[in-house]
């Protein structure tokens, strides 16, 4: 089964990449774009077949390595 | 003082660091491959700058889990000295030896230029050959040097006197203009509570010989050699 870990900068942490992308979109003429935030999507193929255990494992991986909880938050989706 | 420099794949400042340490101590530091697991007989462990593991995932994130890092943590726990410069500072924060994290520079640009650091305290092994409050010129070269930490951690670092260096004007004034990467409270380097672990973004090892354009970084290494002479 597959776990999708999404890692984003925490709310309140300045995201200069998102800001630059927002400015570029405005330059291209796309109106009405508010805040832009950039993150990472990490897909894990897991041998685990139990969704609850797979989620638990992916969350442990996110805490240990995939996300830096000082500046980032993460969410896990099991598919 | 016996120093060791940890060599991770992708770093590129280990030879500069070796030159600076040899100038100060009179002998070559030990180069330790990241897959080694012992640091016996080592007084000071240095994590140099560069791009360990190509900055995959986050700067320093991969190196922080290299085999040698368990021993670096034990060395620190025993009261050993550790210094991380640039990527080494990122590795140290990723490994949890110092609080906070280094974000992308506020202006998004890779900054390769000289800056000035203000010495926040001179009663440590790392800063003993500087004067408190003095500034010195030092090169920096990084894309992710924007120091951040929780408000509580920042208050604690300042309250306990654990800020080592701040980005400043040559006069010592702390300005936004001098703080090119956007670091919280102009912080360029921090100490552990026992003052034996130092992490900083700029490169004092690259200004230790007149041939390099100056010797402003040399007191850091001379101070370490004097403090750890035994």
Image (spheres, coloured by chain):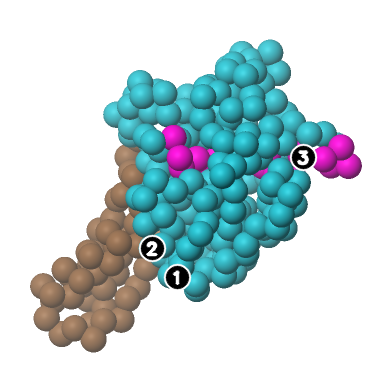
Chain colours: A brown, B cyan
Q: Which residue corresponds to the image point at 72% horizontal and 36% vertical from the top-left?
A: B218
**In this picture, is A47 found above or below B1?**
below
The residue shown at (28%, 67%) is: A61
Q: Where residue A24 sits: x, y (%)?
A: 58, 44
The image quarter containing residue A53 is bottom left
- Does residue B211 show up magenta in the picture? yes
In the picture, measured across the screen, residue B219 lies left or right of residue A69, that is right
Mark 1 burial class by Cα count in 10 Å: few <14, some 14-19, many 20+: some
Instruction: Chain letter for mark 1, please.
Output: B
Q: Is residue B176 above or below residue B203?
A: above
Q: Secondary structure at mark 1?
A: loop
Decide if residue B69 is on the left or right side of residue B30. left
Quadrant in which the C terminus of chain B appears: top right
Q: Nearer the viewer, residue A67 or A37?
A: A67
Q: Nearer the viewer, residue B34 or B87?
A: B34
Q: Write the start and end of the magenta stretch as one range.
A: B195-212
Of all chains, the one bearing label 3 is B
The Cα–Cα distance between marks 1 and 2, rounded to whole angstroms, is: 8 Å
The image position of residue B85, as x and y in percent, is 58, 46
Closer to the chain start, of discs 1 and 3, is 1
Residue B120 lies, with reference to residue A1, above or below; the image says above
Percent x, y for residue B201? 58, 41
Question: Quick check: marks 1 and 3 in contact, CB under 8 Å?
Answer: no
Viewer-closest of B3 and B101: B3
Pointer 1: what residue? Answer: B37
Asked whether, in this view, residue B32 is left or right of residue B81, the answer is right
Q: Position of residue B168 (x, y in %)?
A: 62, 21
Q: Earlier in the sequence, mark 1 or mark 2?
A: 1
Circles 3 and 2: CB atoms closer than 8 Å: no
Label 3 sits on residue = B208
Q: Which mark is residue B70?
A: 2
């Amino acid at each position: 089964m597959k776990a999708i870990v999404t890692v984003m900068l925490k709310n309140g942490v300045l995201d200069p990449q998102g800001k630059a992308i927002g400015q570029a979109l405005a330059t291209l003429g796309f109106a009405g774009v508010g805040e832009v935030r950039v993150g990472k999507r990490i897909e894990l193929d897991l041998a685990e077949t139990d969704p609850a255990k797979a989620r638990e494992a992916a969350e442990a991986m996110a805490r240990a390595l995939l996300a830096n909880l000082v500046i980032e938050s993460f969410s896990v989706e099991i598919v | 003082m016996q120093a060791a420099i940890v060599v991770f794949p992708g770093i590129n400042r280990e030879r500069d660091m070796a030159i600076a340490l040899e100038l100060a101590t009179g002998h070559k530091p030990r180069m330790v491959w990241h897959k080694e697991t012992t640091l016996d007989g080592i007084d000071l462990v240095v994590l140099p700058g560069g791009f360990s593991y190509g900055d995959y995932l986050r700067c320093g994130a991969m190196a922080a889990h290299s085999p040698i890092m368990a021993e670096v943590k034990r060395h620190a726990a025993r009261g050993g000295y550790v210094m991380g410069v640039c990527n080494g500072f990122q590795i140290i924060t990723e490994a949890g030896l110092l609080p906070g994290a280094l974000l992308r520079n506020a202006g998004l640009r890779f900054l390769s230029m000289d800056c000035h650091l203000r010495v926040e305290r001179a009663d440590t092994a790392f800063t003993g050959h500087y004067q408190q409050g003095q500034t010195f010129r030092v090169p920096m070269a990084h894309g992710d040097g924007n120091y951040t930490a929780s408000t509580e951690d920042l208050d604690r670092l300042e309250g306990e006197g654990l800020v080592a260096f701040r980005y400043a004007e040559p006069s010592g004034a702390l300005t936004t203009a001098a703080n090119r990467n956007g670091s919280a409270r102009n912080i360029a380097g921090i100490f552990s509570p026992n003052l034996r672990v130092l992490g900083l973004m700029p490169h004092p090892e690259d200004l230790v010989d007149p041939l390099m354009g100056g010797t402003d970084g040399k007191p850091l290494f001379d101070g370490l050699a004097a403090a750890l002479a035994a």
